Amino acid sequence: MVKQTIQIFARVKPPVRKHQQGIYSIDEDEKLIPSLEIIVPRDLADGFVNNKRESYKFKFQRIFDQDANQETIFENIAKPVAESFLTGYNGTIFAYGQTGSGKTFTITGGAERYSDRGIIPRTLSYIFEQLQKDSSKIYTTHISYLEIYNECGRDLLDPRHEASSLEDLPKVTILEDPDQNIHLKNLSLHQATTEEEALNLLFLGDTNRMIAETPMNQASTRSHCIFTVHLSSKEPGSATVRHAKLHLVDLAGSERVAKTGVGGHLLTEAKYINLSLHYLEQVIIALSEKHRSHIPYRNSMMTSVLRDSLGGNCMTTMIATLSLEKRNLDESISTCRFAQRVALIKNEAVLNEEIDPRLMIKHLQKEIQELKDELAMVTGEPRTEALTEAELLQLEKLITSFLEDQDPESRLEVGADMRKIHHCFHHLKKLLNDKKILGNNTVSSESKDQDCQEPLKEEEYRKLQDILKQRDNEINILVNMLKKEKKKVQEVLYLPAKDRREFRHSQSPPFPPGNPEEGQRMPLSSAPSQAQDFSTLGYRSSLLHQKTGMREEMSLGRQEAFEIFKRDHADSVTIDDNKQILKQRFSEAKALGESINEARSKIGHLKEEITQRHIQQVALGISENMAVPPTPDQQEEKLRSQLEEEKRRYKTMFTRLKALKVEIEHLQLLMDKAKVKLQKEFEVWWAEEATNLQVNSPAVNSLNHKKPFLQTSESQRELSQLLSNKSDVNARKILPSPCSSPHSQKQSSTSTPLEDSIPERPVSSIPLTGDSQTDSDILAFIKARQRILQKKCLGSN
Ligand code: ADP
Ligand code: MG
């Protein structure tokens, strides 16, 4: 059992604007417990924090200042938790702080750079690396991803996400068994056998969450996300299974409602936007007070799910994320205060061991058998009934493995049953006789000698050959894949323009014409995971189409608007940057693949040379009647050291290729996510534009004016046609600035995107209304649009 208080860490986020930075200092030396001091300027202190104090000091296990990178955070905060998780203890890491303070950045990571990946991807990488190294146990890993929004649990990995909206999915509910253990109904567990599979699940959940988010629910700031890795381990043959859970939690924003709130009511400072965080605080307060018998875990779903992580069987770590800009000082101070209370909570983590009943039965059966045998020996009453078929088979297996075991100490354990002992002797006698007959007939004594002389070398060669074959396969598959992709790209380059567009569509349907590299995806993988790579890629891209409804064909106007939107959006820079990095990584992988090929053939040559030398020496020895020298000569030494060197090189390159593969996979996932986000933001913007136009355009007003009742489908069509054309002109003007929130609160039921299904018609066929104001508007549009198109054509020529 490990008794430990919850570990608290602080991380300070770099300010968006330098001049807004508040004053704080970090003291690392103070009796080895670092402290963070926040200075509140008088003008601010007078207002809303506290008009007496100016400086606030808080102690943390460690404080990470603005320049701490993601690697440092992982190494210092997450790695120790992951380590104890691997030995069988439950672990929880949760990030707490106001919206925008860096919780998601810390837990999941940034959406731009590979180096920005956060605790979850790094922990997954670490866990799978360690599991691979340890062959003494059998491990099984499962992943679940839960979102709690408004006290309602949703499974972010529910396969039905593909078909339905978040609201239609069954709610995840809490069940409590008689031992007060919590079980989550409707939360799916997905087995992940590799880092890649686990990473795919993370991105799948994140994408599902992003798509389900609407400006109304703002899931990313108001919901909690709990990514859980479930690990079970068992030693081969043992009946004891260890289970451990690792929760990585991104909590909702902790901001409190301003003191003077809605409708002039004075709200207390302790009121959160998020009620379940309020309950979390109540649980924390109850736990940190001595002699409290009742802890109100049941008040909210989140505290119920995390019950073990707070005052229970778990090693828990909290990261207080702080945005120390002047306007955020009060929120930062409450985050720190919360952390101080959390630090008082003691947890008692125990190893979660369980007996597997099936294995236990087997063990007991064996023990009964042994006891029966012993009893028979002691009482001197030998058992006379014949051995069963199963027993005979078992004995023969034992004899075979005993004979094959090279260990001189190995023993043939058959227990105290005389019938078995007799049977063993009979069987051995039979084997010996068979071998004698066989030996006389076929095996020459000469070759037998040789067998004895070099059994180890032979085995070693065989092993090496096997490894070589495997690597050969891997490399061939890789090279083939690279070739295929190269061919595809070349084909695209030589296709006529029209076909090229179609090709792009087929390669990357979610994204209308634009960049020729859009469709260029190159799954890079080693042989064993190839099949799964393809399946996850398919999974991912089908997710993209289905999630964004992008399968529907966009009208030409929308496509153009999307192109402009894309070009001006900050995320396109990220996508383009990542595309460049991906390209580099691909060529690096290709070059590595070629070098690996070279190294492999060099290894083959060197081995061949060594074998040849051996044969020559043996031949020389026979012809000159000289003994073969027992140690290798200088030439052979040289060859061997070259061989070792080449093998080392091979291994290094292979490791690098593997790391590259993970990086490429991650970058592709990041790009996919960015693309979905871009598409989603475009849809929102498009819908807003449609509403704005409906409200503001004199043309539309007059249309509405003329037809105050329900619009006919014809006029709706005209309107949407108009909008789909007009948006081009206004696109550059109205585009949201990259920093501003794309989700304005403006969206209402009237802002649903105009149907894509409305047939596309040439601009010239729009019937004019007869109203001169409206008509001149429409004509102005058409002209402006034509100018843009002309400009575009000239530019592209
Ligand atoms: P939260 O999840 O707490 O609302 P985010 O993690 O989304 O906040 O962070 C808000 C913004 O700040 C994001 O654009 C993120 O990339 C950036 N950010 C947060 N922490 C850091 C950091 N330590 N270094 C650089 N950028 C950061
Ligand atoms: Mg967040």
Image (tube, grey):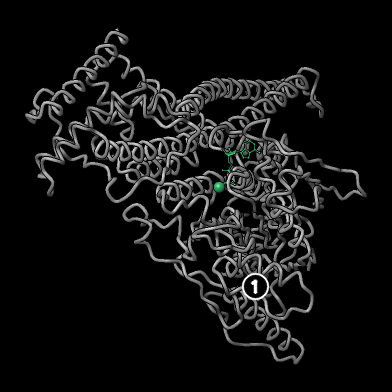
- Give the residue at x 55% y 20%: 591
Q: Is residue 603 above or below residue 301?
A: above
Q: Which image quadrant is residue 258 in?
A: bottom right
Instruction: State the image coordinates of residue 293 (x, y, percent, origin top left).
Output: 72, 81
Tell me the kind of residue under disc 1: Glu
Instruction: State the image coordinates of residue 414 (x, y, percent, origin top left).
Output: 69, 73
Is 560 positioned to the left or the right of 57 in the image?
A: left
Q: Is residue 346 above or below residue 613?
A: below
Residue at the right extreme of this rendering: 31
| 332 or 85, nearer to the observer | 332
| Residue denoted by label 1 | 354
| 515 or 230, nearer to the observer | 515
**Is residue 411 in view?**
yes
Q: In which quadrant of the rendered image does the C terminus lie?
A: top left
**Is residue 61 in view?**
no
Element marked by disc 1: strand
Instruction: State the image coordinates of residue 46 (x, y, percent, origin top left).
Output: 73, 49
Q: Which image quadrant is residue 156 in?
A: bottom left
